Structure formats: structure tokens, C-alpha cells
Amino acid sequence: MVKTRFVLIGLAVLALLLVGGVAAAFALSGSSVGHDPAALASVDIDALGGSIAQVHATGPGGKTIPIAVHGGQLVPKLPLAPGEQVSVEVVIERPSAIGWLVGSEQTEHLTLTAPSARVSNRWLTVKPSSPPRVHFDRPVTAVAYGTPGHLHQRSFQHPRTSVSLGSDAGAAGTVVVASAPRSWESLGKPQSVTWFPQGDSPTVSASPAPDSEISPATPLRLTFSKPVHRILGKGEPQITPAADGSWKQVDRHTLVFEPQGYGAGLSTEVEVELPKKVAVVQSDGSLQEGKEIAWSIPAGSTLRLQQLLAQAGYLPVDWKPQGKPVAHTPEAELKAAVQPPQGKFEWRYSNAPKSLHEAWRPGEENVATEGALMAFESQHEMEPDGVAGAEVWNALLKDAIAGKRNPEPGYSYVYVSETLPEKVSLWHDGKVIFTASANTGIPGAETELGTFPVFEHLEETTMSGENPDGSHYEDPGIMWVSYFNGGDALHAFDRPSYGSPQSLGCVEMRLEDAAEVWPYTPVGTLVTVES
């Protein structure tokens, strides 16, 4: 009986040992996957848990992410984007000695998001001689800052929560800043950071900088040192001259004017007036108290001006683009006005006079272009001054989009020969269609040699002036008058004879001859006087 009792006690002890061993095996063979302060994740394996057999990580859309394992830390082999969601599956293979008891494998899952950092304050006030410093809401291992497409990148051995933009950053400015909290991440989405010099008044930083050149399509960004409503109240900036477009508040501190259509137009001084005075950051970083911020929009290029005038039939040459024509939209035409497309000019007539050839130079200011521009201005009821201002450019671009052409039929040109007998020749659409005797200026009142555009076209007028002896003249009823150089004009005048110097600088013709020439000499027509 005693022997049986000892056997039972021994079996009980053995059972307890087996149960304890199994419990210990279970307790010491576990594993888990969790977050890690440096790696993507870390795997914690108990003493009898075995080893990592397989790691599988996927990103958005099931994209496979290759993973390296370093001492239980899981590190992506390719950069992940901050904020990217990742699913991790880790397979742990247990030792065979206990695998039969607790299972040969254990699979752990974890879904996590790659960390991202944000700028703590995007609007900084900087003391004099102090570099702006950007602060982040968590430590970062890499940053890049500058203008889009031109970022300066820095990496840090030890993560940090703030980064200086350097002493050469300037007293005021705006940059975009991108960051990565982990060394295995790519840089995140850039955020704009604006800094202002310390002052007594609310400050505004404009981009582009005040007094700089812009295009009609350039957005105007105003960033204030304090929230917009605290500085401007319910008021809104006003643009002069009025331009198509609208103001949008893109964040608490920033207003942006987005131009539409032709914006303020080419060759324009643009001014934004604020409802209240502020300290405006100038291009050199200084502050200037005021309500106005100004920029200038330059005129389009001479080459594009000539291309448009040629396309519309105002020049004796045609122009054809090398590639695709400019799209018939305001945006495309404005861009082409500043950056002319490649193409080729060709004479419309094979027998154009030599003097007309000499009046034309592509890509340069010349009298042929001036005359064509004056003709365009006259057709559009503008002052024919031969200067391409904002109104002229807008009209040119609108006509280009609409495909409008010069309503005057053909191209006319007048050349006057002072070789005796003096003559006037009218060249139109490739041939001389009329020649007549003429009188030019006498000694002391010579007709100036050269090529000039007609600037005034009158059926009848009174001519007055001073004779070479100082006496005054006034001749009413002068017919068929085309002024081309100061007081010099093509016109009718009754003389006993024609073909020699008799006038006070004008080119005189018989009444019937002047009437024949006059319809072909509207404003902008070139007149060449040759010896």
C-alpha cells in the first residue's frame, strides 16, 4: 500500500513537471511585431521562439516592399513616402524541439503608417541678423528647402527638431521645405515657409518681389505675418488696371490673385492697393510702410510683334511657324508674345523694291514694322503712334485668336525720286500701278531723304507754315493729303509745271494724280524719298 502511494505521488510530480514544461514552452516560444523608434518595425522573439523565416511587406495597391532584417529590426530597402501605409507579415520558425508541441511556425501581422513631420510654424518673425529657423513637430533625419525645382538637401546623423535656413537666407523670403523623419524615407510633401523681419507693424511679403517684372499670367501671392482677417478685415486688395481674375485665400495668412484670360495685359504697370497700411517687404529685405505694391509687365518681343503683324497681313512679308501654330487661347498667345515660336518670314512679292527690302529687318525695330503697327492702330481706332502698348498688344492677341486680318486690300508702297524729272511711283501688290510727275522741296526747304510711314490721311485740309524768308503762308483747300514726315506730305497743289523742286518740303502732284494716289496711302503706308 505504501509502495502504491509513492508511485502515485511520483506520477503526479511527473505530470506537474510535464504541464509546467509545456507551459514554459508556450511562454518562451512567443513573438510579436511592434513599432520601432528608428526602423519600420521590430520583431521581438522569446528565448525559445525561434528565428525570422520570412518577412512580407506591402504598400498601397498591394505593392511589394523589399525588407532587410537587422537584429530584429525591419528596414525598407527602398525609400517609403512619409505617411505611406504599410502592412507587414512576419513568419517565425520555431525550433523543432518544441515545434511539435506549440507549432512549427508563428505568423504575426502589423499595419502601420510611415511617420511624417510637419512644420510647426509656417510664418516666422526673425530678429535682425538672425537666420530663420524652421521647427518640426517631430525629429527629422533629412530636409530639403529652396524654390520648387531648386532645393538644397541636408541629412543628419542625429535627428533634430529644428533646422536653420542659413545666414544667407535674407531678411525676408519664402521657401518650400520637405522633410523625412526616418533615414529610410523619401522626402515628404513640401510646405511653404515665409519669414518676415521683425517690425512694429503687420508685414506682408509679396511673391514675385515688389517692382519686379512679371508676365500677365503670373499669380500674385501676398503672405501676411498675421492672419489675413486680422490685418485686412473684410476688405479685399484692388488691382489697377482692372484685370480678369480673382483673389483666393489659400491659407490663414495668404491671398493669391489668379489671372485669367489676358490678365492685366502686356506693357503694363500693375498695382495692388491694400485696404490698410502694412509694412511691405522690399526686394532687398527692407520694410516700407504703405498700401501699394507694384510690378511691371514688359511688352512682348519685337519678333513676336512682327509675326503677328505678318500673319494679319500688315507687312509685305508672310510668317509661317516651324512647328505647330500657336494655340488660339489667351494663355498660349501671351506665352508666345514673350517667348516667340520658331518660324520663317518670306516676302509676299518676288519683285519688292530694294528700298522696301532695306526698310525691313526681322527681329529688330524698323520703319516697316512701325508702319504696319500704325496701320493696325488706325484700323482699330487707336492713336497711330507706332508704339505697342498694352491696348495694342491686347488687340493683336485677340485678332490672332479670332483670325482677323487687315481689311485693306493688298500692300501699298510709295517711292519718290528726286532725279529730274522728279516722279512719284505707287507700288501695290507686287507691281507699279501708277507713276506721276511731282515736285519736292526747294533749297532751304528740302524734302528729307529716307523712308517714313504716313501718320495722317486727309481728303482736304488747310496747310500753314513759314517760308524760307520768314514770311507766313496759309493755304486752305489742299486736297488728297497724306502726311508722312513732320510737315511733309503727299498732296495736290496747283503749279504751272511738275517734275522739279518747287515745294516747301512736300511732294506735290497734279490734282488728278494726287486723287489717284491718295486711296492707296492710308495711315501706316511707307513713303521713301530717294535722291
Image (tube, grey):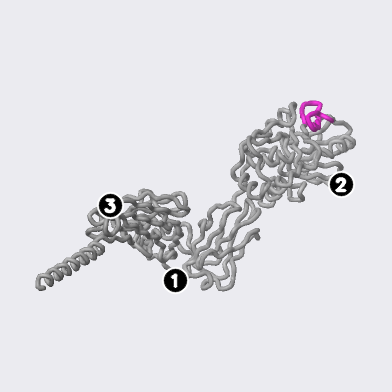
Q: Main secondary structure of the magenta part?
A: strand
Q: Is the N terminus in the top left, top right, bottom left or bottom right quadrant?
A: bottom left
Q: Residues within 10 Å of mark 2 (few under 14, many from 20)?
A: few
Query: Residue at the spot x=35%, y=49% of the render?
Result: 77
Q: Which of the labelled discs sits on residue 476, or is there none?
A: 2
Q: Amino acid at mark 3?
A: His
Q: Which residues are magenta?
A: 416-433
- Tell whether label 2 touches label 3 (CB within 8 Å): no
Query: Residue at the spot x=25%, y=53% of the render?
Result: 96
Q: Is residue 305 left or right of residue 484?
A: left
Between marks 3 and 2, how big is the CA–CA gap? 104 Å
Q: Amino acid at mark 1?
A: Asp
| Secondary-structure class at tag 3 | strand
| Secondary-structure class at tag 2 | strand
Q: Which residue is mark 3?
A: 70
| Secondary-structure class at tag 1 | loop
- Tell whether label 3 touches label 1 (CB within 8 Å): no
Can you give x and y, in whole percent of width and height, for residue 235 in the image?
59, 71
Query: Residue at the spot x=80%, y=44% of the render?
Result: 457
Between marks 1 and 3, how big is the CA–CA gap? 55 Å
Q: Nearer the viewer, mark 3 or mark 2?
A: 3
Q: Give the number of marks.
A: 3
Q: Which residue is mark 1?
A: 200
Q: Is the C terminus in the top left, top right, bottom left or bottom right quadrant?
A: top right
> Is residue 305 depicted above or below 37 in this figure?
above
Q: Is residue 421 magenta?
A: yes
Q: Earlier in the sequence, mark 1 or mark 3?
A: 3
Q: Earlier in the sequence, mark 2 or mark 1?
A: 1
Q: Is residue 525 visible?
A: yes
Q: Earlier in the sequence, mark 3 or mark 2?
A: 3
> Is residue 16 depicted above or below 498 in this figure?
below
